Amino acid sequence: MAETTNPVPAAAPYWVSLLLIPLAYVGAARGGWTVALLPLVTWYLFSGLDLVVGRNTGNGDPDTTDRQLAWHRRITLIWAPLQFVMLFSLIWYVPQADHLNSVERIVLFFGVGVITGTIGITYSHELMHRRNRAERWMADVLLAMVLYSHFRSEHLLVHHRHVGTPADAVTARYNEGFHRFYPRVLRQSLRSAFAAERAMCARRGLPWYDPGNPFWRYGALQGAMLALAFALGGWSGLALFAVQAGTAVWQLELVNYIEHYGLTRAHLGQGRYEHVQPRHSWNSDHRASNWLLINLQRHSDHHVKPDRRYPVLQTYADSEAPQLPWGYPVMTMAAMFPPLWRRIMNPRVRAWRAAHYPDITDWTPYNAGTNPPPGSGTASER
């Protein structure tokens, strides 16, 4: 792990996401090519900034208190109301804006979905890991705005517990292209999230339909968002809301795809796996994209310490965690082209396997997402 070089990292760079909101209004007011400003800035500008400002291999002090991180926390707390106002004011304005044609409206809300997915869901991810009830509620509101509320249950109850194993839908298998991964994860993550909450109810001696099951809250919040979109923009507003929600979910699952692609925990026999280590997540310490994504790319440490706040997530040396060659903006674009993705990532997965698991001789079951059979030359118990 890199050494602590800045006990309390500066908060100001992480507020850069606020600059995206005015761009949405510029696109709505001016039309033309400006409707594409949001994806252009989010994907391409920050990819270029990563090249210019380089990587940040320093670590903040993990014992930094919440009081010391007050300004870091505020950006995650104010984003939800700001996103809500931006989204629904545009849903009211755009359907009646005569200077925007149908294509411009769709492209604009595609861009809105890029930031409700890239920023909104990332902030929701940070908030859902907190014990504070208000922060968790804000996470739910952000997810309801993209109709993906079950992500909280899936992420907390399934993904963190089963990452790198066949039980985790969002661990992308080796050689599994994104276009196969995406429909699979849409189906499986919803089922696994509901099954996890049903099991939680059963452990409390309650039926799945008990009001305490958060799926009731998820449904109510999502229904409220849809109703508001229709009330403000009619059928056109509802369609534009769906465009941004679909785009946001696509952005989320692109990130899920790259975070653990091809990385698996060794099977110890009898359905048991080794503990999660930094080596089970792809790590990236590219500076600019980590400002935008509040250190989400320091994903190796997040899985080791899920309750650690984003400013003090640690980065790791190459020997401890596998490194992505570029930040998430570039890698998610590459993931849309499976031959290019395999050319970039498959050699890295094979090198990772050779470095960490030289005793595993048969990777076929891991590639297929199944439990390796006993005695197959895998890392079974000795």
Image: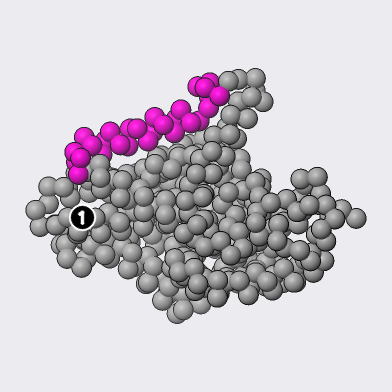
Q: Is residue 272 left or right of residue 27?
A: right
* Highlighted magenta segment, given as a residue range: 208-236
Residue at coordinates 79% horizontally, 64% vertically from top-left? 360
Q: Which residue position is annotated with label 1? A: 105
On-image quarter of the C terminus: bottom right
Point out residue 378 in the picture as x, y percentages from the top left corner: 80, 59
Magenta part mainly helix, strand or loop?
Answer: helix
Residue 233 shown in magenta: yes
Looking at the rendered structure, the secondary structure element under dot 1 is helix
Point out residue 329 in the picture as x, y percentages from the top left corner: 44, 67
The reply to whether residue 135 is in sight is: no
Q: Is residue 245 left or right of residue 93?
A: right
Q: Is residue 300 above or below residue 354?
A: above
Q: Quadrant of residue 173?
A: bottom right
User: How many numbered marks, from 0 up?
Assistant: 1
Point out residue 128 in the picture as x, y percentages from the top left corner: 52, 43
* Identity of the residue furthest to the bottom in this view: 52
Residue at coordinates 68% horizontally, 71% vertically from top-left? 350
Q: Residues within 10 Å of mark 1 (few under 14, many from 20)?
A: many
Point out residue 237 in the picture as x, y percentages from the top left corner: 22, 43
The reply to whether residue 145 is in sight is: yes
